[in-house]
């Protein structure tokens, strides 16, 4: 039996979640853990949308991981439902412990429970360790992604 609990995020978890989002070279440039105001508004939107699943991994009362799972109904692939895994973060103290694998396995299993036939994710091109991790878990690097900042 694991001492890990994966559960929906609460507002009390937000400081820990935002701190994990900021705890890497990319996140440090775009996150602001000192001002939770924008995150609270975003959290309210997420919490009110049944297709959004923002979860935390908790061990011994401490938030040690997080991810967002988005369920997307669609017409392509014969009306397939798909999911997108986003914002996967593991606390620095837990990296290498298998927690990331547990989070992704949870997301894949939840995607199946939600009726998805495809799970997808994106990863910044600079995150080569993450790319190896996702490939090891059975994900294929099958597409090229594009972004446009607004």
Image (tube, rainbow, N blue to C red):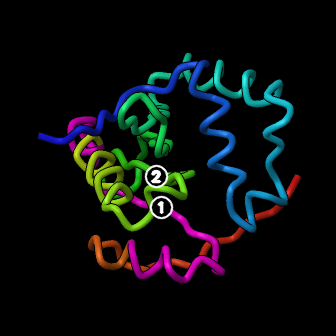
Q: Are marks 2 and 1 in contact (CB under 8 Å)?
A: yes
Give above or below for 125 relative to 74.
below
Give above or below for 64 relative to 49.
below
Q: Nearer the viewer, residue 41 or 27?
A: 27
- The disc at residue 121 is 1
Q: Residues within 10 Å of mark 1 (few under 14, many from 20)?
A: some
Q: Residue at x 21, y 37 (%)?
A: 113
Q: In the figure, is residue 102 to the left or right of 45?
A: left
Residue 137: horizontal and vertical position, in percent? 28, 70
Q: Nearer the viewer, residue 128 or 42?
A: 128
Label whose residue precedes the other's in the sequence (2 or 1): 2
Residue 115: horizontal and vertical position, in percent? 24, 39
Q: Is residue 84 visible?
A: yes
Q: Which residues are magenta?
A: 111-133
**Element type where label 1 sits in the image:** strand
Q: Quadrant of the N terminus?
A: top left
Residue 148: horizontal and vertical position, in percent? 81, 62
Distance Cα–Cα, label 2 vs label 1: 5 Å
Asked if residue 87 is among those painted magenta in the image, a careful observer would answer: no
Residue 140: horizontal and vertical position, in percent? 36, 78
Give above or below for 33 relative to 41.
below
Counting the numbered discs, the total is 2
Image quarter of residue 46: top right
Image quarter of residue 73: top left
Q: Residues within 10 Å of mark 2 (few under 14, many from 20)?
A: many
Image quarter of residue 142: bottom left
Q: Residue at x 33, y 47 (%)?
A: 107
Q: In the figure, is residue 7 to the left or right of 15?
A: left
Asked if residue 127 is among those painted magenta in the image, a careful observer would answer: yes
Q: Is residue 88 visible?
A: no
- The disc at residue 12 is none
- The disc at residue 85 is 2
């Amino acid at each position: 039996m694991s001492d890990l609990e994966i559960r929906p995020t609460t507002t009390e978890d937000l400081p820990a979640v935002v701190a994990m989002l900021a705890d890497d070279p990319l996140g440090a440039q775009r996150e602001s853990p000192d001002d939770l105001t924008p995150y609270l508004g975003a959290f309210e939107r997420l919490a009110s949308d049944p297709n959004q699943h923002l979860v935390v991994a908790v061990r011994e009362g401490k938030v040690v991981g997080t991810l967002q799972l988005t369920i997307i109904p669609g017409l392509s692939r014969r009306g397939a439902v798909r999911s997108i895994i986003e914002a996967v973060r593991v606390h620095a103290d837990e990296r290498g412990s298998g927690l990331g694998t547990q989070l992704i396995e949870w997301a894949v299993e939840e995607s199946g429970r939600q009726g998805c036939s495809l799970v997808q994710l994106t990863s910044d091109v600079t995150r080569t360790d993450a790319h190896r991790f996702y490939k090891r878990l059975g994900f294929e690097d099958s597409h090229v992604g594009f972004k446009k900042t607004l």
